[in-house]
Amino acid sequence: MPHIAVIVGSLRRESINRKLAQALARLAGSQCRFDLLELGDIPLYNEDLFDPEPPAPVQRMKAAVTEADAVLFVTPEYNRSFTPAVKNVLDWGSRPYGKSCWPGKPAAIVGASPGAIGTAVAQSHLRHVLVGLGMALMGQPEIYLTFKPDMIDAEHNVVDDRTRQLLGNHLAAFLAWIERHRPG
């Protein structure tokens, strides 16, 4: 069963992207294991904090990504780009030089927003960075979800049949992508 590290780009407890990540985990059931990483205690990237190791929250995050078979980025869109929380995690994970946790790691991006174009611009920016870090990024299908308050219930079930099908198709494609990029 694939183990997927999930990076939710919003730090809010009631984030719609956190709800989306939890709904994807629920939808996946026993097909894979989702591990939503805690990002709120990771300090802003600062090379001076390596003394001689990075801070414990950074070590925890890098270990979780390294142990996972893949990474799913669930990003909101802030000012037409992805969030500082995501950028910070990417920067920490790529350091120190030669010890990045990203190269070769299968990855996918999803995101939700109340706006009509979902998180299309944020995902476009994030794609450039993930490819630059050497991740094996799944290109299709893409999901730019316009989030509606009644789309996901309190138990993290996707209520809308069309949305459930869309997310299920993305999840199936991602699981196949992970299988294609397994070492050995």
Image: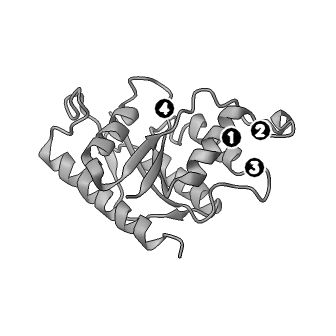
Location of mark 2 (residue): 54
The residue lying at 31 percent from left, 45 percent from top is 24
User: Where does the image place residue 156, in percent across and percent down from the top left?
Assistant: 26, 34
In primary-sequence order, the first of circles 3 and 4 is 4
Proximity of marks 1 and 4: CB atoms separated by less than 8 Å: no
Residue farthest toward the bottom in the current orientation of the protein: 184
Nearer mark to the viewer, of 4 and 2: 2
Proximity of marks 3 and 2: CB atoms separated by less than 8 Å: yes
Image vertical order of residue 54 relative to residue 1, above or below:
above
Give me the disc on residue 95.
3
Location of mark 4 (residue): 10
User: Where does the image place residue 172, in percent across and percent down from the top left?
Assistant: 29, 61
Location of mark 1 (residue): 59
User: Where does the image place residue 31, in percent across and percent down from the top left?
Assistant: 30, 55
Proximity of marks 1 and 2: CB atoms separated by less than 8 Å: yes
Marks 4/2: CA–CA distance: 23 Å
The quadrant in which residue 152 appears is top left
Image vertical order of residue 102 relative to residue 76, above or below:
below
Nearer mark to the viewer, of 1 and 4: 1
Q: Amino acid at mark 3?
A: Arg
The quadrant in which residue 34 appears is top left
Q: Amino acid at mark 2?
A: Pro
The quadrant in which residue 160 appears is top left
Q: Is residue 81 left or right of residue 133?
A: left
In primary-sequence order, the first of circles 1 and 4 is 4
Question: How many neighbours does mark 1 have within 10 angstroms: few (below 14), some (14-19), or many (20 or more)?
Answer: some
